[in-house]
Amino acid sequence: MQSSNPRAARIAALIQRVIASNMESTLHDKRLKNVTITDVKVTNDLQLAKVYWTTLSHTGNDDGERKRAKTALDQAKGRLRTMVGAKAGLRLTPQLQFVFDEVPGEAHEIDDILAAARKRDAELAKMRETAQYAGDADPYRHDDDDEEEELDELEHDHKDDYDEYDGDVVEVEELEDFDDDADDIEQD
């Protein structure tokens, strides 16, 4: 349904302006008081226009308001199409199809999820302030450990002082490889 036609995009913007401006001023329907037109998508052949709408209410009976607004929009569909045809100057005015837009409701849900995440982050920050290390605060060795360096230097300095080992010398025989296939390198 998404159009790549620039003319369809211009007509969609025009339809959105006409419907939004005439909804309260011309229709005078109280059921459409909180209705907002969020988007309009027109097919490339300009035969059908999907009008996305939502209600901006903060009362507890959102479903009832939505049903009443849907009924009012369906009843006013013909008048709105006539107004669009008069403003657009088209030979054929697109049919209007009203679709409830779920995006604003989902946006509120995402805002609630983000608020819960911020609250949890604040709780974790408070816990970090009073937290203590299980072991040392800094478990790593540092270069300022002079004792270990001195021991290392002594070991290296006296390395040449040792005599050769006079003990038993063991000779190791090299074994022949009887498996001719496994270790052979292929020659080209």
Image: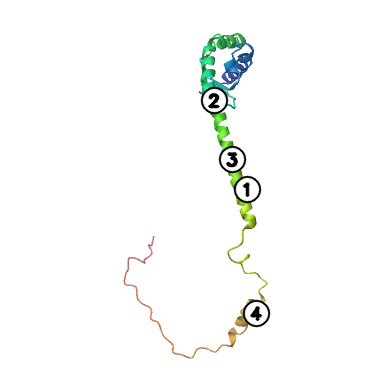
Q: Mark 1 or 3 closer to N-term? A: 3
Q: Disc 2 or 1, which lies upstream in sequence?
A: 2
Crowd around label 4: few <14 · some 14–19 · many ≥20 (10 Å): few
Q: Which label lies toward us, 1 or 4?
A: 1
Residue 122 marker: 1
- Evaluate if marks 1 and 4 touch, with contact meaning CB atoms under 8 Å apart: no
Q: Colour scheme in the image? A: rainbow
Between disc 3 and disc 2, the foreground one is 2
Image quarter of the C terminus: bottom left
Q: Where residue 106 appears, x then y in whole percent? A: 54, 32
Q: Is residue 126 visible?
A: yes
User: Disc 1 and disc 4: Cα gap in Å?
Assistant: 48 Å
Gap between marks 3 and 2 measured at Cα: 23 Å
Q: CA distance from mark 2 to mark 1?
A: 33 Å
Q: Amino acid at mark 1?
A: Ala
**Amino acid type of the residue tagged 4 in the rendering:** Glu
